[in-house]
Each structure stands twice: as structure tokens, then as C-alpha cells.
């Protein structure tokens, strides 16, 4: 069994992937600078280093010491609004540091990488569902910073034989079924955790930004994927690289979307709580519909979502939020 280095393994998606890797018997080592991650999210017994991915010496030593074969790279800043306010931060933390990190890995003899990318690389879509061949025109620095990394991986593969898959997530959500880890961000911006915080009385209400979109109920539609399904697809992507699957980007979603109102109504049903809502104006740059075309990932990796129905997503997220209303 190969040894996997997980960067950003103390973050939301990273920590769930670490848990699934452990359950499947993988040897692994986690690095995270804990700027946005939480040490409590990584189980005791798994080697953990409070290290920044740009630290060449530290990363090289960890790769050598643990005989790392492959890397799953999550470490990044991921708040769209923050990226607009501080684009320099995102191009430094995401793009520049990843370039240093991957260069260090290649020099240390690691040539397999699964990269945590984003559907934000597409910008405003020209077609729905969105295929991997759609134009990539990000409308915020977060999406641009991730797209620049994808482009660099393409050229690193040509120069050094790097094998890579970039997973373009749509909307990650949910938590492990025992509620031991879940979604926590220091500045929460995601609909499902915000809605459940309102259910817990931690917020006065949940705002619905835009009710006049060209959708059945007038609110935005998004493709939600359970975080455990995301964890699964990272492992399948690693295994696919071993089998010689072609490098490149893959969408990760379900191909089905839910509206903001549908999410809130499901949250009311799951929690049994009347969650107050406030209608507000549209936010600039919010597309009406973002749904993934997932034929390619199904055919290349044989992947199918197992937990990404809306009820399961919200039920598992609710277990986490009830258990840890203020986070860990």
C-alpha cells in the first residue's frame, strides 16, 4: 500500500479524506499550517506536521522520512469574497506556494498528484450542465488562482512526467455520519452551514440572495456533493493515476441541482425548526444555475455518488452542527 501525503489535511474536505484513507488502510502523513485548518480534525496516530507547503526543506524531509509515493493537495485559501478583496493573498497562498510545493515534490521523486481544484475555474457558464471542455473564464481571483495551478500542472507534466488529476468540485457539503468532524470555516459563507446555524439560533435568519432568477422558484440552483463522496473520488483518482489514466481536470458533482429554497426547506424538515429567512438582492457574479456534467468522471474512474442526496447531506451536517455548534 502506497504512502500518501495530504496537504491541508486539517481542513474540511482534507480531514474527511484523511479519515477515509485511514479506513481503507492507506499509510499517510498530513501537513497543514493550521491557518484555516484545525488540528482536532486529524485523528491521533496519523503523522501530522504543522508545516507550510512552501517550506522546501521541511517538505523534502517529510517526503524522505515517510517514503511518500503520492500527494493529495488541498492546502489553499478558498473564500471567494476574500479573494476579491485580497487577490494578492490568493495568488501568493494558492498559486505561488503550490508552484513551490509541486516543484519540491518533483525534486524529491514524487510524480503523482491529485489536486483540489474548483468549478470556479469556469466562471459564468455558457451551457448547463457544465462539461470539462467548457471555457474557463473565472470571475474571481479564487477561481483564477486555481486555474493557474491547473495550467502549471499541465506544463510540469510535459517537462517532468508529473501525473496529475485536478478535481473541479462543485458544492461540497455534509459531514461524517458520527458527527465527529464536519464543516467549519472561520468566516462561514456556505449556504448549508449558515442555514443550520440559523436553526441553532446562532444567526437571526438566513438571507436568500436573489428571488428573480430564471429558475423554477426564482432562487439560484447549485450541485451539492457529499464530502464523503468527495473523499472517495480523491482516492479513486490516485488509483487511476497508477493505472495510467490520462492527466487533466475532472468535474466532481452529481449532475443534479437544488435551489436555495429547496435547501432551506429540507433543512427545516430535517431539523424540525422553522428557520427564518430574509429576501435580499442578487449578489454580483452569482450565476443562476451551476450543475456539473459528470459523464467523464464516471467513465474514467467508475465513480458514483453514494451519499449526495440532499436529505443525507443535511442530516449529516446537522449531526455535526448539533454536536459542535461553535466548531471543535
Image: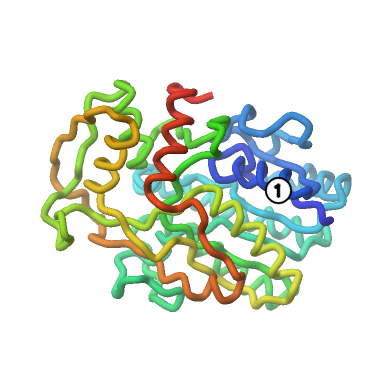
Relative to 128, does residue 78 appear above or below in the rendering? above
Could one spot residue 93 in this view of the protein?
no
Q: Position of residue 220 (x, y in %)?
A: 23, 54
Which colouring convention does the figure follow?
rainbow
Q: Quadrant of residue 105?
A: bottom right
Reading the image, the residue beneath label 1 is 21
Q: Residue at x 22, y 29 (%)?
A: 274
Left or right position of 182 against 71: left
Q: Position of residue 272 (x, y in %)?
A: 29, 29
Give the secondary structure at mark 1.
Answer: helix
Q: Residue at x 44, y 28 (%)?
A: 321
Could one spot residue 277 in this view of the protein?
yes
Q: Which quarter of the image is occupied by the N terminus?
A: bottom right
Relative to 254, does residue 278 appear above or below in the rendering? above
Relative to 2, does residue 203 appear above or below in the rendering? above
Q: Residue at x 81, y 58 (%)?
A: 69
Please state which of residues 253 and 142 is positioned toward the viewer in this rendering: 253
Q: Position of residue 165 (x, y in %)?
A: 61, 67
Left or right position of 175 against 318: right
Left or right position of 15 against 134: right
Relative to 233, does residue 280 appear above or below in the rendering? above
Q: Residue at x 35, y 64 (%)?
A: 291
Q: Quadrant of residue 201?
A: top left
Q: Which quarter of the image is occupied by the C terminus?
A: top right
Q: How many marks?
A: 1
Please state which of residues 131 and 254 is positioned toward the viewer in this rendering: 254
Q: Position of residue 118 (x, y in %)?
A: 47, 58
Amino acid at each position: 500500500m502506497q504512502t500518501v501525503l495530504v496537504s491541508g489535511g486539517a481542513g474540511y474536505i482534507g480531514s474527511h479524506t484523511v479519515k477515509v484513507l485511514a479506513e481503507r488502510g492507506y499509510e499517510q502523513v498530513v501537513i497543514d499550517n493550521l491557518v484555516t485548518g484545525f488540528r482536532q480534525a486529524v485523528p491521533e496516530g496519523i503523522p501530522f506536521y504543522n508545516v507550510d507547503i512552501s517550506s522546501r526543506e521541511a517538505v523534502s524531509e517529510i517526503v524522505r522520512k515517510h517514503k511518500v509515493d503520492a500527494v493529495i493537495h488541498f492546502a489553499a485559501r478558498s473564500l471567494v469574497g476574500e479573494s476579491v478583496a485580497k487577490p494578492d493573498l490568493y495568488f501568493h497562498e494558492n498559486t505561488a506556494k503550490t508552484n513551490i510545493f509541486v516543484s519540491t515534490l518533483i525534486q524529491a521523486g514524487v510524480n503523482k498528484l491529485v489536486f483540489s481544484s474548483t468549478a470556479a475555474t469556469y466562471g459564468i457558464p455558457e451551457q448547463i450542465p457544465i462539461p470539462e471542455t467548457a471555457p474557463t473564464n473565472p470571475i474571481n481571483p479564487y477561481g483564477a488562482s486555481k486555474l493557474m495551478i491547473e495550467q502549471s500542472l499541465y506544463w510540469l507534466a510535459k517537462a517532468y512526467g508529473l501525473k496529475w488529476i485536478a478535481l473541479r468540485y462543485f458544492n461540497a457539503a455534509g459531514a461524517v455520519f458520527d458527527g465527529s468532524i464536519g464543516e467549519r470555516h472561520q468566516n462561514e459563507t456556505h449556504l448549508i452551514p449558515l442555514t443550520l446555524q440559523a436553526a441553532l439560533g446562532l444567526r437571526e435568519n438566513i438571507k436568500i440572495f436573489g428571488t428573480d432568477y430564471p429558475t423554477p422558484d426564482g432562487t439560484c440552483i447549485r450541485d451539492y456533493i457529499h464530502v464523503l463522496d468527495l473523499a472517495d473520488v480523491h482516492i479513486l483518482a490516485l488509483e487511476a493515476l497508477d493505472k495510467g489514466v490520462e492527466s487533466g481536470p475532472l468535474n466532481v458533482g452529481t449532475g443534479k441541482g437544488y435551489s436555495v429554497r429547496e435547501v432551506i426547506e429540507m433543512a427545516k424538515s430535517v431539523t424540525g425548526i422553522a428557520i427564518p429567512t430574509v429576501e435580499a438582492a442578487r449578489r454580483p457574479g452569482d450565476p443562476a444555475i451551476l450543475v456539473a456534467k459528470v459523464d467523464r468522471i464516471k467513465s474514467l474512474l467508475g465513480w458514483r455518488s453514494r451519499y449526495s442526496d440532499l436529505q443525507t447531506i443535511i442530516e449529516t451536517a446537522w449531526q455535526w452542527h448539533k454536536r459542535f455548534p461553535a466548531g471543535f
